[in-house]
Image (cartoon, rainbow, N blue to C red):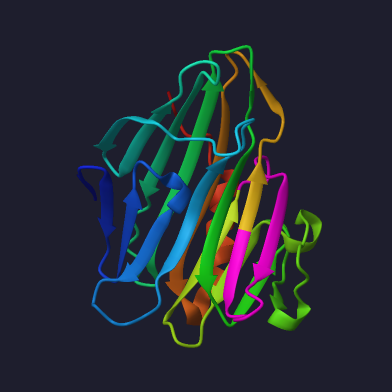
Amino acid sequence: MWTINEEKACLDSDQMRATLDLQRPTTGLEISPTDGSPERSDRILCLDRFADSPTPTWTLSEKYVRGTDLITTYDEPPPSAWHGQVYWKSVSSNDPQIALAIETSVSIHSSGLSLNAGMRSTSEVYADEILRLQNHLSEDFQTIKPAQIKDTCKLNECGLLFIFRSHEKRWAYVEMIHPSDVCTATLQWNSTNPRESTLSFTMLPDELEKGVIRLVRLKGAFVACENDREIAREMFKEFVDAPLPLTT
């Protein structure tokens, strides 16, 4: 269950803790072990918004917990006239092979004449290797090593589902995006430390007309390394086949 303390939110599982600065969704979820072990923290599902301004803002107007959802609302006055809601859904599971799973849905609309609706999600994960699946119909994952990565990989090279593995961690990180919501995918390595990887999805680059609501959906999960392929493939299929969530 999510808990809110002023402008911070926290979600604990038996193995992991996710913390979020509600006023700065651009910093995403910081993931750390709950047992105090010195594992390197990952930062996932950082949400950036494109805008005419070089530094588009997120002005928090409402925050609350409903069931398994943490819901935040952001409003910008004219000329932006931008309204958005972010649902951070804790996906409960009795499977001991899933340490933590969070679905993120972002709905946006504008009361102005038009709005640059593009968004970007970025995750920074420590990994020794990355597996990718092109789509939910693919059968086999492809393993990617640092030496194979170019500065930029487009969507048709990178796919929609990724598994990040670290030899030092029990849990692998899985991230996926709904096929109808993504425009491009970029996978990068830190040139000075190839184990520091960054995955970015760009979404909704088109202009949003007044009154039109758009929705994007992503999911991040930490799963047992020994069965990460099977868990991730089944999770992705369920995610793609799931009905649209209800938003306001």
Give x and y (percent) for residue 134: 73, 61
The answer to whether residue 145 is seen in the rendering is no
Q: Residue furthest left?
A: 5
Q: Residue furthest bottom?
A: 167
- Image vertical order of residue 18 relative to residue 86, above or below: below
User: Residue 64 is drawn in which quadrant?
Assistant: top left
Give x and y (percent) for residue 59: 40, 31
User: Residue 248 is drawn in which quadrant?
Assistant: top left
The answer to whether residue 220 is seen in the rendering is yes
Report the number of discs: 0
Residue lying at 60% horizontally and 18% vertically, measured from the top left: 212
Q: Is residue 9 left or right of residue 117?
A: left
Q: Which residues are magenta?
A: 178-199
Q: Of 189 and 93, which appears nearest the observer? A: 189
Give x and y (percent) for residue 228: 53, 74
State yes or no: residue 196 in magenta: yes
- Image vertical order of residue 30 relative to residue 111, above or below: below
Q: Is residue 169 left or right of residue 127?
A: left
Residue lying at 32% horizontally and 41% vertically, measured from the top left: 70
Give x and y (percent) for residue 54: 60, 38
Q: Of 231 and 222, which appears nearest the observer? A: 222
Residue lying at 27% horizontally and 49% vertically, measured from the top left: 9
Q: Of 131 and 124, which appears nearest the observer? A: 124
Q: Is residue 181 left or right of residue 106?
A: right
State yes or no: residue 237 in magenta: no
Q: Residue furthest front?
A: 54
